[in-house]
Amino acid sequence: MQALLAMIRKEFQQLRQDRKMIPAMIAGPVIQLIVLGFAANLDVSHIPLVLVDQDRTPASRALVDRFTGSGTFDLVGAEDTPSALDPWLVQGRAQIALVIGPGYGADVAAGRPPHLQAIADGTDSNSSGLGLGYVSQIVSGVGGELAATRLSAIGRSPGKVGQFELVPRVWYNPDLRSRWFYVPAVLAMVLMLVTMILPSMAVVKEKEIGTLEQLIVTPLRPWQILVGKLTPFVVVGMFDLVLITGLVTGLFGVPLRGSFLLLTGLTFLFLMTTLGLGLLVSSVVRTQQQAMGFCVYVLMVPMIYLSGLIFPIENMPRGFQEASRVIPVRYYANILRGIFLKGSGIDVLWPDSLALLLIGTTVLTVASLRFRKSLD
Amino acid sequence: MSLRKLWSVAWKELIQSARDPLSLGMLLGVPCMMLLLYGYALSFDVRHIRLAVQDNDKSAASRDLIASFVNSTYFDLVATPPPGTDLEKLTARRVAKAVLVIPERTSEDLAAGRPARLQLLLDGADANTASTVLGYANALVAAANVSRLAGSGGPAGGKLTLAPIVYEPRVWYNPELDSTHFLIPGLIGFILMLTAVLSTALSVVREKERGTMEQIRVTSLKPGELIVGKTLPYLGISLAATGLILVAARSLFGVAVAGSYLHLFAATLIYLIGALGFGLLISSLVDTQAMAFQLGALSSMLPAIFLSGFIFPLRSMPWPLRWISYGVPARYFNVVLRGVILKGAGLESYPQDMGFLVLYAVVVLTLAYARLSRREV
């Protein structure tokens, strides 16, 4: 036990010796959180709209007012002909162009269906899709009014026809802020950095410098070396957990509806998988550069992307959905969103916890066996 | 600056990276892997939303409405919970993303000309998906209403063709609104930033860490020769990676370069020079590879993902971040790259963005050169 404590103390000292390391392990997560928290936002507002109104009647102006008054669109310019729209869309100064052809007002007055065209810069498919959705919402609103006027003109009261009315109720995130979805994800990314990449680089560093041999000739047992090496990173990881949870709730107003104790416990399960993977990498590679590359490219990037942290798993093809089942981050993402947003308890989260436990035990066992073999 | 010396440094660096096939393989293999990920797996295009329907009315009208939801192909009917079910559990356990509740007496209300209120319960945890789902549902309900109006209207009960407004949406450059087309140019900017900054920074710091920098110092190499020589191989590797991505994007996902390859190459070269310079700058600031990685990842990778418009639109960000994003070269590169690849535009359409890229490269290289030569590298 004393030997273990001494080993842990040595590791902490070593970590402190590189004086820039500890600030980096704390400042890094904070910067990451602030950037992601404020930047990761797929909500679409202030869509720049360029207008071609060839009609210039009260009816067309009323239609334009509906767009500018919606709060979703910013009118950034007007052109006389559709052919002048090209530079607006090529340079990205406008995302959507609305074209009201000549005869719009005359059609409305005569009760004929008027024509309307919207052109979207499809490069940003997500924003354009949502933007066109807003356009058609406004258009169908105006169209409904026109239809009602026309019906009453031919002597039928539109009130006689029962209409559906959709009353949406959004759970967990009533204002539909996409920030609430992304901010808890930072925790998973930071923990991967601190408890997977950095430990694997630390172990490889000893190999590189040759000090691992010196450790082997000490009376320390392999598992003591292992625990000693990993403990500081677990401590920093747990510190990051508290820090980030504080910022997530305090700075970004994301609710923590579930229990923090449960979050801490399940985070330990997640750390088993990250530490195990980091250790496994360190037994495969020879240099720190390789360790870094392996961890970032082969593990972290695919795990972040395929886990549903950013891109929803439901949108993936079947094969990828199945493949994502071996990724521990997938389960941790469910746990994070469950505890933060939905207030879920272990009665809902047990399948995810069990999966983490299974993956964690397997990876950690394989990794320690390989580590011991490399010491013998 | 002697070309011969330059070449020998570059050659040494190339041999060194060739001796490390794992790292070299990663420099070339990773872009391909990310491309496959983005092309095949990742998408914001919402389809097959798991929908639960609680039909308390069980009338022809309610069945028609449900059928229109299912037939739209946006929704998959996964459950029909009986009255009294705890609907919130359905979303908490992620059985369903949305629950449509059709109340009793819906058909009676409709027949009497009263509005019938439908309830749509949404799992808002993923706000982007939820907004899209809400949009689909609104459109479906609006369509159902229009057809009800049309069915009822007209003299003597005859059907009235009612098209309120003939609305033609058109999408340029990416008619299918396929997110792959959006993501691939951004992906090139991101990967180049990552490989160029990190591999240069680590390769210089490695020499510091192992003490071989001292050995280089006593040779007759000038700082400029060393810097250029060390970065040249990575410039080559990064350009090769770009080519690889373009070929794969075209053959696998049909994303072809609509504009000129020459313009594409010129923009990429300028961007890469800036990125390599930034890697050198980082290497002059830190002493260990672990630190170089941390600093490099934080200052290049993070902004290249989040502050460049790669995934998240810059317009929706608060102004402080938008201001910071003006200092992120990937921001300008993405605009230019999307223009050249998707819109078929030339560099002349983006004088400001190109200007910033050149400015960035000059500033960063000057700083890196000043720092590295002061330390008498």
Image (cartoon, coloured by chain):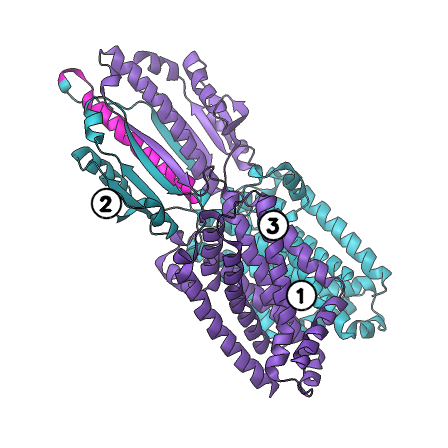
Chain colours: A purple, B cyan
Image coords of residue B74 (percent x, y): 32, 44
Task: Give the vertical position of A244 relative to A52 (above or below).
Answer: below
Q: Of helix, strand and loop, which mostly describes the magenta segment?
A: helix
Q: CA distance from mark 2 to mark 1?
A: 66 Å
Say which amino acid is labelled 1.
Pro
**Residue B30 forms part of the magenta stretch:** no
Q: Which residue is mark 3?
A: A246
Hey, which quadrant is residue A60 in on the image?
A: top left
Q: Residue at x 45, y 26 (%)?
A: A98
Pointer 3 chain: A
C-beta proximity under 8 Å, tags 3 and 2: no
Image coords of residue A62 (percent x, y): 44, 16
Q: Residue at x 53, y 70 (%)?
A: A277
In the displayed structure, does residue B125 sit left or right of residue A231? left
Q: Secondary structure at mark 2?
A: loop
In the displayed structure, does residue A316 sit left or right of residue B376? left
Q: Residue at x 17, y 35 (%)?
A: B59
Task: Give the vertical position of A97 relative to A6 (above or below).
Answer: above
Q: Secondary structure at mark 3?
A: helix
**Residue B151 forms part of the magenta stretch:** yes
Residue B192 in sight in this render: no
Q: Secondary structure at mark 1?
A: helix
Choose mark 3 or mark 1, whichever is in front. 3
Task: Give the vertical position of A142 relative to B241 (above or below).
Answer: above
Q: Which residue is mark 1?
A: B233
Q: CA distance from mark 3 to mark 2?
A: 41 Å
Crowd around label 2: few <14 · some 14–19 · many ≥20 (10 Å): few
Closer-to-camera residue (B208/B329): B208
Image coords of residue A242 (percent x, y): 60, 55
The residues colored magenta run: B129-156
Same subunit: marks 3 and 1:
no
Q: Which residue is mark 2?
A: B82
